[in-house]
Image: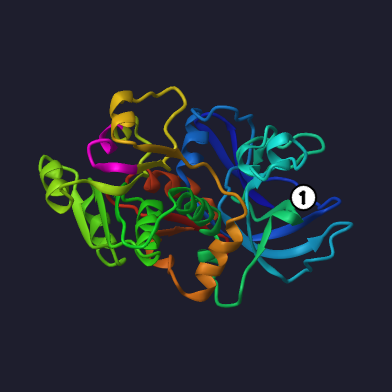
Amino acid sequence: MEAVVIEKPKFFQVKEVPDPRPGEGEVLLEVKACCVCGTDIHLLDGDFKGAFYPLIPGHEFSGVVKEVGPKVSHVKPGDRAAVEPFMACGYCYFCKTGKTNQCLHGLVIGHSASREGLRLDGGFAERVVVPSKNLIPLAENVSYEAGSFIANLGTIVHALRRAELQPGMDVLVFGTGANGLILAELSKKAGAAKVVVTGRTKSRLEVAEKMAVDETVVADENQDRELKRIAPFGFDVVFEATGSSQIVERTFQYVKRGGKIVLYGLVPAQAFSNFNPFDVCRKELQIVGSFSSVNTCIIAHELLASGLIQVEHLISHRFALKEWAAAVETARNPSKCMRSIVLMNR
């Protein structure tokens, strides 16, 4: 079969690799759609901590079950499914207390190289073996393209839970990527009185305007004035969805006294932000982190199946597997690309 193999940082090939076979508790999935995530770009560039090469990337994907391994009884060949990529061990302290996203031995499909006794190959391949417990069955009205959003959508649902959003709150989202816009849309549909999105890319802000947000603000020299016009006392919840340490610092300017800052974007491990602890204390601010998801991918699927949200309009570019280089380079340019996706039957 064909697969994308990152041999080492900055060097990959789309090449023939051996067909995988499912072992106990595993299934062979024929991949139909796989999204290009920023993490895939970091893996290619060699700046993702903990990666082992060579590896097959791709952790946001969906497909159809082709074969099941021993002791798999809840799915069968022909079943359509998305994949929850985070693999918790199930036995460490944090897993036993329900915080599986904090697993001491957690791994992510498509992030690390497979090794003996452990398969971590990702979805940028014609076929992939995954644990059957990581499958999220797809309803007939959920497309493979939409299914490939479920992994990320699950993290968004988790972030909203971390925010403890209440009806009538005002919400500000920094970031106009697909995740930031979905965060904004779900905040509005969860009962927020006012939802504002701010970012640098005007074309993405135009998409936001079609997704039930109340106002959009360009991140230029007028950003501060516009945000303070909209919410003179600040916002109850501010989501940081860019992964920028500089933007993290800016969130403190716009959170209301007694409000909450939710750090959703993954800031590089070596980056730091400065803030005033006195302000946090005096204004009774809450700074909340949100990482991965905890049993929310199934909720993400329900949101898609119910029609509460749509995601296909966020896909701006579609590519074949052999065009992976173009898919990645396109995804690097946020002014032109909202979401880049690889379709195996293209």
Name which residue lies at 31% across and 51% down.
176
Under circle 1, the secondary element is loop
Residue 17: percent from left, percent from top: 70, 45
Eyeballing the image, is 279 above or below 233?
A: above
Pointer 1 local density, CA inside 10 Å: few below 14, some 14–19, many at least 20: some
Residue 78: percent from left, percent from top: 73, 71
Three-letter code for the amino acid on which mark 1 is drawn: Pro
For the view shown, which residue lies furthest in the bottom direction? 141
Start-end of magenta stretch: 249-259
Disc 1: which residue: 20
Name which residue lies at 51% across and 69% down.
304
Name the one closer to the observer, 125 or 141. Answer: 141
Seen in the image, is 236 located left or right of residue 262? left
Residue 45 located within the stretch drawn in magenta: no
Whether residue 146 is visible, yes or no, is yes
Eyeballing the image, is 255 above or below 192?
A: above
